[in-house]
Image (spheres, helix red, strand yellow):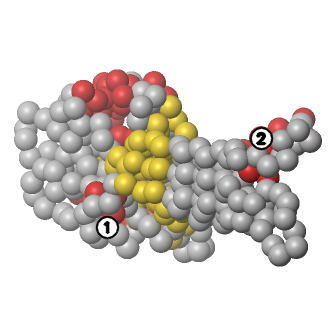
Amino acid sequence: MKFVDEAKITVSAGGGGNGCLSFRREKYIPFGGPDGGDGGDGGDVYLEADSQVNTLIDFRYQRHFKAHKGEPGRGKLCSGARGEDLVIKVPIGTEVWDDGTDELIGDLAKAGQPLMVAKGGWHGLGNTRFKSSINRAPRRTSDGTPGEERVLRLEMKLLADIGLLGLPNAGKSTFIRQVSAAQPKVADYPFTTLHPNLGVVTLKDVRSFVIADIPGLVEGAAGGAGLGIQFLRHLTRTRLLLHMVDMAPDDVNQDPVESVEIINRELENYSEALGSQDQWLILNKMDLIPEDIREEFCQEVLDRLNWQGKVFRVSGQFGEGCDALCDQIMDYIDDVKEAEQAALKTDQSEE
């Protein structure tokens, strides 16, 4: 299935039903008085996060959605039925923006989470509502108000614990195939990954985490070069970034140090928060470096980068060092979750 992570739709809530103009007419009751009922309210439009929906591709074919209108009022004080609400299913992790004002309306990050995006119109009033001591037979009613209409921009952000990034051909897809059941395309040319891939990494102790592999970035990606910034948004929800570096590139002019600096510049240009996110350096394709110079070469790269964070040496092709890396990732995620739970309890106790 084609991966689509952005769509624009128009939603219209139902209008309110009109009030009814009616008088009671029964035998032996010559002055029955007004009995026109109110109309029904218009239906609202909701978006709801659904775990069974994976992409926004359906919105490429249907872009207009409208809830039901409220029914008009009837005689004998019968009110019109309320219009049925419209519920639109979207993937978990969808951000909803008002395209006109560029306002963030909501973030659907949990399964089953609803979000009202358009309010239905109010019902009109029947002539019974206008009866008074000086106007015993009113011929006045009111119409229902129209429902709210909005143009929405939907942006999907993958929900993953770990984000995998690097230049094209850094070995990201090979790594995710090695540690999970995901099967992204692997080939000996750049940009084999054209859309993000999610993989679930399950350890021997049954603990697991989700890793997201996004298409390779190039210099100027934050400004639109290559695949541009359209997939960088998927990294903003992750707890940790794995920066994968090709230590044995086919191009002899490609410097691993320069590769790391290019990616980090693009992250900072995209957003300050993404540039300061926790990041581990993964030196990949170590099997292609002779063992007698491997340690010296890696240390030279780290010295030139003045790298202060964690570093791992792996071979995605043969799985060397991958198990140890996944164990440490899992421990890191557990620590982060514990800290989040502790902070939540502290906030609740203060409230």
Label 1, secondary structure: give it. Answer: helix
Q: To which residue does mark 2 refer?
A: 343
User: Residue at position x 22%, y 56% from top?
Assistant: 193
Q: Position of residue 255 (x, y in %)?
A: 17, 33
Mark 2 vs mark 1, foreground winner is 2
User: Residue at position x 40%, y 69% from top?
Assistant: 180
What is the quadrant of residue 262 in the picture?
top left
**Closest to the observer, 322 or 150:** 150
Q: In this rendering, would 44 be left or right of 160?
A: right
Q: Say if residue 176 shows up in the picture.
A: no
Name which residue type carries label 2: Ala
Q: In this rendering, would 70 be left or right of 347?
A: left
**Residue 332 drawn above or below residue 306:** below
Report how many numbered discs are placed on residues in the image.
2
Q: Position of residue 267 (x, y in %)?
A: 36, 31
Q: In this rendering, would 337 be left or right of 291?
A: right
Quarter of the picture holding the N terminus: bottom left
**Residue 145 drawn above or below residue 3:** above
**Closest to the observer, 227 or 295:** 227
**Closest to the observer, 324 or 115:** 115
Q: Position of residue 194 (x, y in %)?
A: 21, 54
Q: To which residue does mark 1 refer?
A: 177
